[in-house]
Image (cartoon, helix red, strand yellow):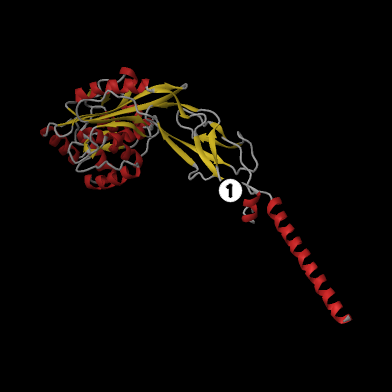
Amino acid sequence: MIIMKTLKKRRINFHIKIYYLIIIVVLIYVGFCLLLPIKTLNSTSSSSSISITTQPSNMPWPKTGSAAVGLANGAVATNGSHTPRPMASVAKLVTALAILKKYPLSPGQQGPNITITAADYADYTKYISEQGSVVPVYIGEQLSEYQMLEAMLVPSGNNIADSLARWAYGSISSYDTYANNFVKQLGLSNTHIGGDASGYLPNSTSTPDDLIKLGGYVMNNPILAQISSMKSVKIPNVGTLTNYNSILGIDNIDGVKTGNSNQAGGVFLGSAKVNVNGKQVLVFSALMGDTTLAQSLNDSIPLIISLENDFAKTIIVKKGEVLGEYNQPWGGKIQIIADSNLEETLLQGQTVSAELNIQGLKVPSRAGTTIGQLTSLSNQFNPSISIPLITKSATSKPSWTWRLLHPGSEL
């Protein structure tokens, strides 16, 4: 009997110990779930940057052909077909860039002398027979690289373009091969050079939006910007020749190049300087397939005037605009909003980019907690600007039942 009582007492004590152990384990589990700090929430924004394009204005587009307007880095608005068209003498801008790529000049330099050969004179007579624009040359005469560029771009000598290409690249076919790789490197994906360096043949084609980019490269080169702004040029053994760009100086127009042929119609790539935020900014218009060169020049003026008037303070991101969110694992979302307007001076139709820098969100956090910033990228007439990003609402706390059913979710 004594032994039985002892065993019974031991069983009771064992069960009590198990009971207390269970209670201790439960208390530890509950404490672990309820007292463990809640992890920082991460933003669900899919990108670290945003890109915004403003609404283009209603431009006074020409009635025929295709056109584009924009800045040095590209078009902001286009009109008409995007199918490449013959670009006529505007192709000489590609030739000029290619020549200076191989034989660069600094302002004030004339560069090497180029001797006119029999092949150059043959080009001269050929273009005369085809009624193309020419600059007279004579076998054995010498012109500097700079003078040849003047003769090619101002009076638009077709023969000078071919002579320069042959001098620099050995042959027209070698030049064409180089030029077609060159334009792709410049990002002119719809531009093709074919058959000559002058653009007289219709095989040299482009689009207005490509020409806008081409204008940016040309006018950012001090040699070509200087030459394309000349109303006339004096060529040795020839005399003074006039620029076909007859609207130079009108409404701040300071370049770039005209083109004209039966296949191309009137072609004009023009640039003008606009004062924005105390800085001079280049704007461009490009017209292709107009009825005549004179018409393309006339049609470009209202486009340039409209561009000059299209710079304005523009709200890129409005105060309170949602730019991301945090997902709470226990339910609910916390929206990320702009704390103020992000405003810049822009050309209507321009695309701007901004970077999002969003931090993790601690729980609990109140509404209006600053969790990062939105920074616009600087451009040619705006500095980089940043605005704070804040939470639209306060975080909620997970219920005790959720925490008990999701042990370790806070880690």
In the image, 238 versus 70, the foreground residue is 70
What quarter of the picture does the N terminus occupy?
bottom right
Neighbours of disc 1 within 10 Å: few (<14), some (14-19), many (20+): some
In the image, 54 versus 184, the foreground residue is 54
Residue in the picture at 43% in, 37% down? 51
Residue 86, position as x, y percentages in the image: 20, 36
Residue in the picture at 38% in, 27% down? 348
Quadrant in the picture for residue 28: bottom right
Side (left or right) of 237 relative to 324 = left
Residue 185, position as x, y percentages in the image: 35, 44
What quarter of the picture does the C terminus occupy?
bottom right
Disc 1 element: loop
In the image, 312 versus 261, the foreground residue is 312
Q: Is residue 20 above or below residue 64?
A: below
Side (left or right) of 220 relative to 234 = right
Q: Callout 1, which amino acid?
A: Trp
Residue in the picture at 80% in, 71% down? 14
Task: Name, please, the residue furthest toward the top.
Answer: 250
Residue 136, position as x, y percentages in the image: 19, 30
Task: Name, please, the residue furthest toward the front.
Answer: 1
Residue 380, position as x, y percentages in the image: 45, 30
Label 1 sits on residue: 330
In the image, 172 versus 10, the foreground residue is 10
